[in-house]
Amino acid sequence: MKTVIMAGGRGTRIASINSEVPKPMIPLSGKPVLEYEIEALRRQGLTDILLIVGYLGDTIQSYFGDGSKVSPVTGETFGVNIEYFVENKPLGTAGALFSLKEKLTEDFLLLNGDIIFDIDFNRFVKEHHNKKGLATIITHPNNHPYDSGIIIADEDGKVLNWLHKEDSRKWYRNRVNAGVHILSPKIMDKFNFDVDEKIDLDRQILKPLIEDGELYIYDTPEYIKDMGTPDRFYLIENDIKSGKVEQKNLQHKQKAVFLDRDGTINKYVGFLRDIDEFELLPGVSKAIRKINESGYLVIVVTNQPVIARGEVTYEELNEIHNKMETLLGQDGAYLDAIYYCPHHPDSGYEGEVKELKIHCECRKPKPGMLLKAAEDYNISLSESFMVGDGENDIIAGATAGCKSIRIGGDVNSLLDFVNNYL
């Protein structure tokens, strides 16, 4: 698969770090951002690279050559094949693609040139092929969703809406575009743009695909961050030095903190049916933010029998969870995944959903939700924690092989758990 990297940016927001080189060549721990990208691609056999360059593009071409040169940082050859397309004038984030149409004859990977990442591309490519859309974009949670574009998708990953930063929003799932895409060359036939026309990838190419159901997401907790501001630059530099970037690749075993919801994250009110009753407990945002920073995944596993009882619809439950993610995001914290059990074994409730009145393997104290998450995210359960306020949480965690911590028993709050165990 060919990889196209958009490396023509000037980097005006990060000029205080280094204004003498193009944005993709700004060094992190002594090595250019673009070199990290190329290394991450090469490790997974993605060696056919096309670089779109513009501002000070000769600096990039001189440094990498055709990919056979020796890195002045590592002393090893880059080990890839590089072609270049030079933008003589700014063409936006997608204009160059239409000039490259003859070279892009198969599905291709498209990356921003200012991101640090380490992801399992085999998973991504497989998901794209399974969905059979014209484009698949990687989404993930971040710690500043309030000033990011939000991607709304259904359970199959089909994108339903794309909220830009200026669009109004209330409660939303914290999922943003990570700047990593797989595109079909058929996209170039779908739009009638002129060669050398300045085109915005998100607004003029990807978002219009939504109406025909041709845009999908691949959601992953793996490490993908842009270094577009000084604050993010220094954060990423620390993550590189600590090994966090590489470890988050799902090819490696992950560690997780599994969290019960009611009484652990939010105030316990019995069966939560009304979104207005959802209220984060004190210190929860700070605790989850610390877990995020530690490198552990944060995964909610919650029994929701109100679905089977007919007291809350799936849509209403999703909106409650959207409120939870929005409130956490406002405090710089995020969840990597939410699993819930909609079943309830006992019948006799007015309005109940009969097909959900079953004995299942996902309802705690059964460990099904933890086992499914471990399969989805390659989690080492023995290195993970289950944290909740009930006996069912403790049994589920222990049965799955986790270290189980009870709030109200082992610790007084989620923040106490973080301070004592992580």
Image (tube, rainbow, N blue to C red):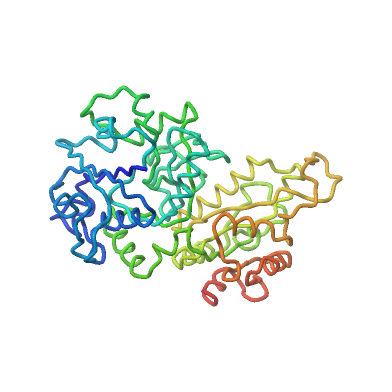
The answer to whether residue 26 is left or right of residue 276 is: left
Position of residue 42 relative to residue 181, above or below, is: below
Depth order, front residue of 41/369: 41
Tell me if I can see residue 58 in this picture. yes
* Residue sitting at x 60%, y 63%: 258
Q: Where is residue 376 drawn, in percent x and y?
A: 57, 54
The answer to whether residue 296 is left or right of residue 59 is: right
Depth order, front residue of 168/122: 122
Q: Where is residue 275 drawn, in percent x and y?
A: 62, 47
In this rendering, the count of numbered labels is 0
Position of residue 110 relative to residue 236, above or below, is: above
Position of residue 205 relative to residue 410, above or below, is: above
Residue 17 image-quadrant placement: bottom left
The answer to whether residue 269 is left or right of residue 124 is: right
Depth order, front residue of 28/267: 28
If the image is split into quadrants, where does the N terminus sit?
top left
* Residue sitting at x 39%, y 48%: 178
The answer to whether residue 9 is left or right of residue 138 is: left
Q: Where is residue 254 drawn, in percent x and y?
A: 51, 64
Q: Residue furthest right?
A: 348
Residue 420 image-quadrant placement: bottom right
Q: Where is residue 90 drawn, in percent x and y?
A: 19, 37
Q: Residue furthest top?
A: 192
Tell me if I can see residue 12 in this picture. no
* Residue sitting at x 40%, y 66%: 244
Position of residue 86 relative to residue 22, above or below, is: above
